[in-house]
Image (cartoon, rainbow, N blue to C red):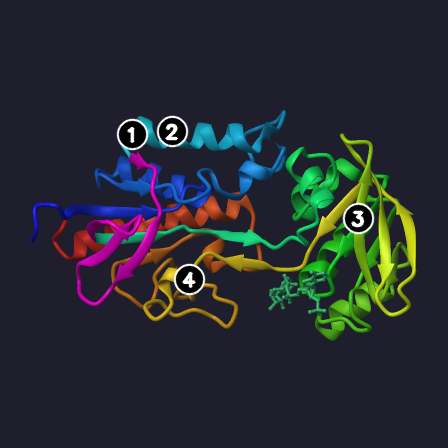
C-alpha cells in the first residue's frame, strides 16, 4: 500500500445528527472513527432555526447550536473530524476505498454513510431570503409547523409528503392553502382524499408561487400565478412550507450500494446494513419516511453498533 494511503477502522461520511451520533458511539467503542463533514458541515439542521422536538432540550435549541454540541460531544471521545468531501468510492473488496476531494485516498474496514438528503426548493430569491433568515419559509412542517399555530400558512407540492404535511399543519394552523402546480395530485389516492376532505385545507390547482412577500424580516403572504390563465392573486400567510421532494445525497454510491428509484440507500430491514459487507447507512440517506433529527440520531447509533459487531466478527477489533 502506498505511504500516502491512510488506513482507518471506521470512516463516517456526513456530519448531521446521524453521522455525529455514529461518531459518539464508535469513538466510545475505541473504533477511532474518522468523520468527513462534507459540503454542508452540520447538515440540514444548520438551516433550521429552533429545534423544539429533540428530547432533552426543554427550552429548545437552534439547529446550528445543536450541531456544534453534537460535534463537541463526538470530539470529546476522540473522533477525528475533518473538512472534506468524499468524491468517489470503490467497494470492490473487503477494504473499502474512498477518495477525499478527488485526491487523498483512504481505506476503511467499515464505512458509515450518513450523507443525508437535501430538501428541494423552488429557487425563487424571495423564498431563499425568508428561508435563510428563518422568516417564514421551511421545508419541514413537523419541525416548524408549531411556530405557526393558529396562523394562516401555505404549502407547495402535491405528493404524499405535501399531503401528509398539509394534514399536520391543518391540525395546528388556522388555515392551509395548498398549491398544486398541475391539475392533479401526484400523491396516493388515500392521501389526496384526506386533503380534499379536510375543510381547513384550500387547494389551488394550476397554481405556483410567483413571489414570497414580506417586510424583509418575516413573510406576510405570497403572489400566486395561475399557470393556465396567467392570472395573479395574493394570499396572506405567515408561513410557507415547501414540500416538493428531497434528494438523497447518494450519487457517489450509485453502482455500489442498492438504491431505490429516488436514490435512497436500501438498508436491510431492522438494521443499518447495506448490500456491501462492512458498509452501513444511517439517517436520511436511507429514510424518506421519518426524516427527523431524532430518527437520524437513532439510526446513527445502530450503524455504529453494527459496524462494531462487524469488526469484532472479522477479528479486526
Ligand atoms: P414526490 O416527488 O412524490 O412529489 C413531489 C411533488 O412536488 C409533486 O407533486 C411535484 O409536482 C411537486 N413539485 C416538484 N417540483 C415542484 C415545483 N418546482 N413547484 C411546484 N411543485 C413541485 O415527493 P414526496 O416528498 O411527496 O414523496 C417522496 C416519496 O416518499 C414518494 O415515493 C412518496 O410516496 C413517499 N412518501 C410516502 C409517505 C407515506 O406513505 N406516508 C409520506 C411521504 C412520502 P408534480 O406532481 O407536478 O410533478
Give 170 or 97, whichever is nearer the viewer. 97
Picture quadrant of residue 267: bottom left
Q: Name the secondary structure under disc 1.
A: loop
Badge 3 crowding class, 10 Å Cα cut-off, few under 14, some 14 to 19, many 20 or more, is: some
Residue 12 coordinates in the image, percent (x, y): 32, 46
Q: Which residues are magenta?
A: 80-108
Query: Does label 3 or label 2 sit earlier along the sequence?
Result: 2
Residue 302 coordinates in the image, percent (x, y): 38, 50
x 22%, y 57%: residue: 97
Q: Name the secondary structure under disc 3.
A: strand
Relative to 102, is 265 above or below?
Answer: below
Tag shown at residue 32: none
Residue under label 4, please give it: 251
Residue under label 3, please give it: 211
Residue 195 coordinates in the image, percent (x, y): 81, 63
176 with respect to 263 (left or right): right
Whether residues under marks 2 and 1 lie with C-beta atoms below 8 angstroms apart, the answer is: yes
x 58%, y 38%: residue: 47
Query: Does label 3 or label 1 sit earlier along the sequence?
Result: 1
Mark 2: is the Cβ under 8 angstroms from ligand 1? Answer: no
Residue under label 2, please give it: 73
x 38%, y 59%: residue: 271
Q: Residue 86: within the magenta?
A: yes
Query: Does label 4 or label 3 sit earlier along the sequence?
Result: 3
Q: Main secondary structure of the magenta part?
A: strand
Q: Report, in whole angstroms, how far the alpha carbon at label 4 lies from the one at label 1.
A: 31 Å
Q: Name the secondary structure under disc 4.
A: helix
Picture quadrant of residue 150: top right
204 with respect to 108 (left or right): right
Relative to 237, is 190 above or below?
Answer: below
Residue under label 1, please give it: 77
Numbered disc in front, either 3 or 1: 3
Amino acid at each position: 500500500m502506498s505511504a500516502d494511503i491512510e488506513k482507518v477502522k471506521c470512516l463516517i461520511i456526513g456530519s448531521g445528527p446521524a453521522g455525529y451520533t455514529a461518531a459518539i458511539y464508535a469513538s466510545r467503542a475505541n473504533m477511532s472513527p474518522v468523520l468527513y463533514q462534507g459540503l454542508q458541515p452540520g447538515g440540514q439542521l444548520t438551516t433550521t432555526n429552533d429545534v423544539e422536538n429533540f428530547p432533552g432540550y426543554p427550552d429548545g435549541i437552534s439547529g446550528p447550536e445543536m450541531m456544534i454540541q453534537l460535534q463537541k460531544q463526538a470530539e470529546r471521545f476522540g473522533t477525528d473530524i475533518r473538512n472534506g468531501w468524499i468524491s468517489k468510492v470503490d467497494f470492490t473488496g473487503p477494504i473499502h476505498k474512498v477518495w477525499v476531494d478527488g485526491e487523498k485516498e483512504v481505506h476503511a474496514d467499515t464505512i458509515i454513510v450518513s450523507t443525508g438528503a437535501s430538501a428541494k426548493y423552488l429557487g425563487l430569491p424571495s423564498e431563499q431570503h425568508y428561508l435563510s433568515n428563518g422568516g417564514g419559509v421551511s421545508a419541514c412542517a413537523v419541525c416548524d409547523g408549531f411556530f405557526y399555530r393558529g396562523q394562516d400558512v401555505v404549502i407547495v407540492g402535491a405528493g404524499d409528503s405535501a399531503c401528509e404535511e398539509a394534514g399536520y399543519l391543518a391540525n395546528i394552523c388556522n388555515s392551509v392553502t395548498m398549491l398544486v402546480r398541475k391539475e392533479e395530485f401526484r400523491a396516493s389516492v388515500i392521501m389526496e382524499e384526506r386533503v380534499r376532505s379536510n375543510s381547513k385545507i384550500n387547494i389551488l390547482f394550476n397554481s405556483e408561487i410567483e413571489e414570497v412577500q414580506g417586510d424583509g424580516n418575516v413573510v406576510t403572504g405570497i403572489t400566486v400565478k395561475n399557470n393556465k390563465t396567467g392570472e395573479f392573486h395574493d394570499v396572506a400567510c405567515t408561513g410557507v412550507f415547501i414540500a416538493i421532494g428531497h434528494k438523497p445525497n447518494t450519487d457517489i454510491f450509485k453502482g455500489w450500494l442498492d438504491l431505490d428509484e429516488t436514490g435512497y440507500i436500501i438498508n436491510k430491514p431492522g438494521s443499518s446494513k447495506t448490500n456491501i459487507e462492512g458498509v452501513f447507512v444511517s439517517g436520511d440517506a436511507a429514510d424518506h419516511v421519518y426524516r427527523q433529527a431524532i430518527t437520524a440520531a437513532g439510526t446513527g447509533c445502530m450503524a455504529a453498533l453494527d459496524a462494531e459487531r462487524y469488526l469484532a466478527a472479522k477479528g479486526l477489533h
